[in-house]
Image (tube, rainbow, N blue to C red):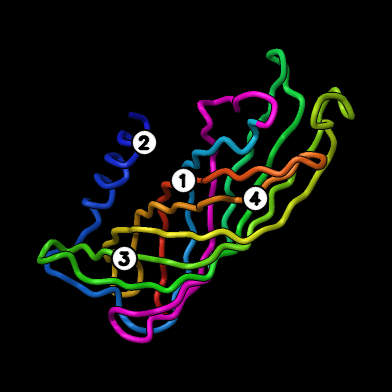
Amino acid sequence: MKKAAILIAALAGLLLTAQAGAQAPGQGFYIGAGGGTVWSKGGQIYSDTVNEDASLGGKVFAGYMATDSWGMELALHSLGRYEAEFANAKIADMRTTALSVSGVYTQPLFNSGFNVNVRVGLAFTEAKYTCASSCGLGIPANVDTRYRGVAGTIGLGIGAKITQALSMRVDFDHFGNVKHQVDLTEFNEPYDVLSASLQLLF
């Protein structure tokens, strides 16, 4: 329900910025930044994460549209901070970041003033587990651990031009099987991200 409410609010804000008539995003280089909500269970090695597995996240990105429809995008993502708990007490933090490289396909959405984009690529991830209390105890041992891996990522977005160069977009991104490790125990968790961003075309 919370995901749906956030998505409705983001799309309502986007609707207020849309110009009449279908418009392609445009060719050339672009940069952007935004933030939103991330859902995962990346800290659940001992017990479930708090805050309903939700955290604040953000991204900065740059890309190049070779045509009105096809391009590439490079993005640096903060996939949130999660608290691991044991016996209702915080024992550690899990922070996850990703650097993604994606192909982009975008098209105007009929005559609505919006455009849609689809992104498919790879994400180079890092999950950093930091002990906060009861360090060295438990199975697996509650110790600082950092793990890097590669995960697939897919995204779907909708955008609208505010000016000829400035756009707003709302994106949903999925990162599958992000690799984590605590002590010698490895596990995978997906991440889902809903964000709103501003994008500047050069």
- Name the residue carrying label 3: 117
Q: Residue at x 52, y 45 (%)?
A: 190
The CA span between labels 4 and 3 is: 27 Å
Mark 1 near mark 2, Cβ–Cβ under 8 Å? yes
Disc number at residue 64?
none
Question: Residue 14: x and y, percent?
Answer: 27, 52
Q: Earlier in the sequence, mark 1 or mark 2?
A: 2
- Asked whether 67 falls inside the magenta stretch, the response is yes
Where does the C terminus fall, quadrant-wise?
Answer: bottom left
Q: Disc 1 on helix, strand or loop?
A: strand
Q: Which residues lie in the magenta part?
A: 45-74
- Name the residue carrying label 2: 3
Q: Is residue 110 positioned above or below 58 on the image?
A: below
Where does the N terminus fall, quadrant-wise?
Answer: top left
Question: Residue 163: x and y, percent?
Answer: 29, 69
Q: Amino acid at mark 4?
A: Lys
- Name the residue carrying label 4: 179
Q: Disc 2 on helix, strand or loop?
A: helix
Horizontally, residue 85 falls left or right of residue 177, namely right
Q: Residue at x 61, y 58 (%)?
A: 98
Disc number at residue 192?
1
Horizontally, residue 135 falls left or right of residue 84, namely right
Q: Amino acid at mark 2?
A: Lys
Q: Which mark's residue is nearer the viewer, 1 or 2?
A: 1
